[in-house]
Image: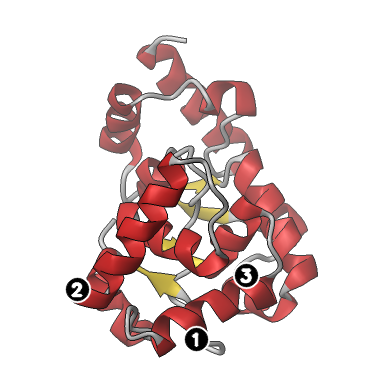
Amino acid sequence: MTTKELIKLCYKSIKEKNYIHFPTEIFIELDDEKVLSILKEFSGKYMMMLPDSEIAFFEWLKIHDEKIWIDLWHNTAANDDEEYIVSVDLLPVLLNKDGRGFPICDLVANDNYYFTEKQMVDKESKIIIEVARKLFKEKKELSPAQMLALEISLEPIDIWHFAYRHKINLAEAKAAVHSLVADGALVHLKEAEYVARFVNF
């Protein structure tokens, strides 16, 4: 699909739904150039539906940690058909196909578990990350704490996407956070106003 056709599709979706919706087969074909064209045309003016892969994640979240789902989506939609509508400006973040998805970083009624490399304490975290990288290269099993440290060193991630991506339960994922904090390798900022200082997208 050409960029011109894609823009036309977006306008058609806006006319029919009042937001942009990319079918899965279209979304997976988006590249940086097309995303820039979409943002140039629609940034700051329209909303979009999350991609199907991310909707699947949030349906999982609703089952496994409902209070977090409520914190994110309660009262954001007039009906179920309008759930998962976000700013089109988040498209570059959502295009990241490594499973990090829509960042959960601004919870109000619950503790945030969103981490960036800047929250890794230099000396202690470097040791853990180097060990994790060595084990990964040798195709050996990593502990959840080692996996989390490695993930954070690559790109920001929240604990729910981390658990979903690696297919581990949330209690184990949170225990990994507590382990890194106890080891002095990670700073856990729980309130959204403090986390916001480290959010850049």
Callout 2: 10 Å neighbours few (<14), some, many (20+)? few
Name the element at disc 3. helix
User: Residue 73's mark?
Assistant: 3
| Dot 2 amino acid type | Asp
List x then y, in percent, for residue 52. Answer: 65, 40
Instruction: Please tell me which residue is depicted at 27% across the width and 31% down the height of the picture.
Output: 36
Name the element at disc 2. helix
Instruction: Please tell me which residue is depicted at 55% across the width and 64% down the height of the picture.
Output: 143
Tell which circle, 3 or 2, labels the residue nearer the N-terminal end.
Answer: 3
Q: CA distance from mark 1 to mark 2?
A: 29 Å
Q: CA distance from mark 3 to mark 1?
A: 12 Å
| Dot 3 amino acid type | Trp
Instruction: Please tell me which residue is depicted at 34% across the width and 54% down the height of the picture.
Output: 155
Tell which circle, 1 or 2, labels the residue nearer the N-terminal end.
Answer: 1
Q: CA distance from mark 3 to mark 2?
A: 35 Å
The mark closer to the camera, 1 or 2, is: 2
Q: Is residue 158 left or right of residue 71?
A: left
Question: Which residue position is annotated with label 1?
Answer: 108
List x then y, in percent, for residue 147. Answer: 49, 59
The foreground one among 117 and 126 is 126
List x then y, in percent, for residue 163. Answer: 62, 62
Callout 3: 10 Å neighbours few (<14), some, many (20+)? some
The mark closer to the camera, 3 or 1, is: 1
Above or below for 103 versus 94: below
Question: Which residue position is annotated with label 2?
Answer: 122
Q: Is residue 139 left or right of residue 172?
A: left
User: Residue 125's mark?
Assistant: none
Q: Quadrant of the C terminus?
A: bottom left
| Dot 1 amino acid type | Val
Name the element at disc 1. loop
Which corner quadrant of the image does residue 12 belong to?
top right
Instruction: Please tell me which residue is depicted at 71% across the width and 67% down the height of the picture.
Output: 169
